[in-house]
Image (spheres, rainbow, N blue to C red):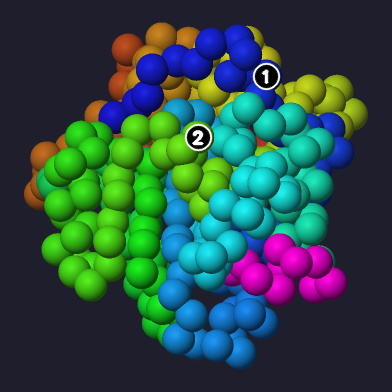
Amino acid sequence: METPPPDSQTISQETPPVQVFTPPSVHLPDVVNGQSYCHYSPLPNAIAQDPSAECVLGVDEAGRGPVLGPMVYAVFYLPLPLHRSLLAEKHRFDDSKVLTPTVRTNLMEKLCTPSTDLHQNCGWATNALSAQDISAGMLKPVGSYNLNAQAVDATIELIKGVFAMGVNVKEIYVDTVGPPQTYQNHLSRIFPTTAITVAKKADSLYPCVSAASVCAKVTRDAALEACYHAHLSASSSPIDEPAVAAEGWGSGYPSDARCSTWLKKNMDPVFGWGNSCRFSWSTVKDMLDTKGGVRVDWPVEGDEDDLRVTDYFSAASGGGDKQADEIANWFGTPMAEDIF
């Protein structure tokens, strides 16, 4: 399930800044290896010193629509009395899409700096769903795990993690996935002792959701940059490509010309792209089908005993014997076909 294509202003706001701040929520080994993971900030002093303090928690995401990079869900919590005074009035948190990259970065840096009031009073966590895992779920042959279901499960996992840390969460605000009332009822059954509000544009209505959107967005920007650097490290001609994601594959949205150009230029006819790509997106499926990708025909179970590797590649994908010859020479020296 893909989201509608964004407009040019959204693409601009979703493009990582040239100078990317890397928060502790970016676990580089997991990011470059295509693994999903959660990150929880330390319990803030204000809550650690008073575990009974009633808290408010907000939930939002970044990166739902792009074809490249992870989708990141974030939660942000703090004592209820500070909800609007600290976040909205003092630090001017807002929906990350209306804040400039510089403002988002500054807010995140303050949140990660021990001497600040944000660090001392606020906690946060992220759940980074890798492109590889998103695709694996959506492309399951039986019982497809769609993007909405993955998003809901990521949210529930984060909230449960905050409760497990001993935080006394009394109110939860969530930017909706699907019909708000249906989602709200679902969460209320799981967390019956907490007042839950699910709303459209919650990131513009509730400061804790705005703060969660900033955590999610800055984390995704840095993760996308890490994915791009991993691509450059593996590239045979990195000198021919821009040094930063903003100038390379851009925002990662299919409708972004930088992204679509990068996809066309870097498509491997057999393997497509690396683990930073969501193969479940129609953009890449269509590109593999129509722009020179090799068609693979999988045999019926039980009929594959006498097949060679080259027999899996359809002659219709361009070349028949020529394609087989290319695969037989895969490692750079001719080999007899019998080896397959």
Query: Measured from the top left, where is residue 191 in percent x and y?
Result: 23, 68
Q: Which image quarter is the C terminus in?
A: top left
Q: What stretch is highlighted in magenta?
A: 114-127
| Horizontal and vertical percent position of residue 76 | 53, 59
105 or 77, which is in the foreground?
A: 77
For residue 242, say whether it is visible: yes
Q: What element carries label 2?
A: helix
Residue drawn at the location 71% of the way across and 73% of the way down: 120
Mark 1 or mark 2, which is nearer to you?
2
**Residue beneath disc 1:** 12
Name above or below for residue 193 compared with residue 209. Answer: below
* Left or right of residue 285, residue 94 in this image: right
- Tag 2 residue: 204
Which residue is more in the foreground, 329 or 185? Answer: 185
Is residue 23 found inside the magenta-colored segment of the image?
no
- The alpha-carbon separation of the residues under discs 1 and 2 comes to 19 Å
